[in-house]
Image (spheres, helix red, strand yellow):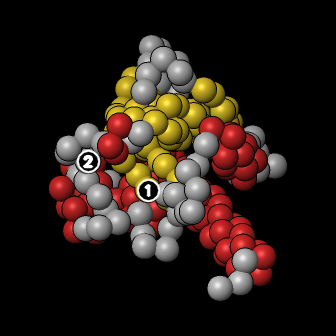
Amino acid sequence: MGARMRVIVTKDDREICSVAYPECLDLREDAGAIARIDVARQYPSLGGLLLNLNAEESPFTTFGCKVWASTEGAGAEPSQFASRIGLMVSHGADETDEAQYDDLARRLAALLESEPGDALYVELQITPAELARGRRGFCLRLLLFARGAGEKQAQLRWTLGLARVQQALLFLARAIRQNRSNELIRRQTRNPP
């Protein structure tokens, strides 16, 4: 059995994510806006992930992404291909707090750590966020790094890693929807109309 994907969960209080910036594209409201995201056009697997995460039934919303490649010094695997996706849990009845992001990151890390991928590394950063209308909240920055003998190999590994990330997030999305549905039923049972 090969080595597993490496995953760490961190908190970054130094930087505040701005989710409310004017150029933020709302893919939930306008799925066609995906065509205006350069990296989504350039990397169709990333575009597919963004559309899935912003689908109407998804509990997630993305607010930004970036892709980059870098070359390290001399060595067996000098190239790295990486991405960053800003992710928020869209609110059900309640605002999602830091503890819920901790739980989400822990559950996502557990799913990803069971995946093969010694050339893959994921960092899940829980970060304060500035939301619409001056509200404060949190977000999850998902960073995926893939190493390879050259940029093409690193990019291929990144694409495979992105598919594993998508699978894990879709699994968690189903669990979140089920929990919300169960909570709604409990509330209705306690407080009938």
Residue 24's disc is 2
Q: Is residue 160 left or right of residue 100?
A: left
- Gap between marks 2 and 1 measured at Cα: 11 Å
Query: In terms of secondary structure, where does tag 2 sit?
Result: loop
Q: Residue at x 41, y 63 (%)?
A: 54
Q: Nearer the viewer, residue 53 or 95?
A: 95
Instruction: Decide if residue 169 is on the left or right side of residue 84.
Output: right
Disc count in the image? 2
Does the residue at mark 2 contact the one at mark 1 (Cβ under 8 Å)?
no
Q: Position of residue 42 (x, y in %)?
A: 25, 53
Label 1: few (<14), some or many (≥20) within 10 Å?
many
The amino acid beneath tag 1 is: Thr
The residue under the point 78% across, 76% down is: 190
Q: Which mark is residue 71?
A: none
Label 1 secondary element: strand
Query: Is 160 placed above or below 32 here?
Result: above
Which residue is more in the foreground, 41 or 34? 34
- Res. 27 image quadrant: bottom left
Q: Is residue 85 left or right of residue 95?
A: left
Left or right of 73 in this view: 68: left
For mark 1, what is the residue?
Answer: 61
Residue appearing at x 41%, y 39% in the figure? 135
The kind of residue tagged 2 is Cys
Q: Residue furthest bottom?
A: 193
Q: Residues within 10 Å of mark 2 (few under 14, many from 20)?
A: few
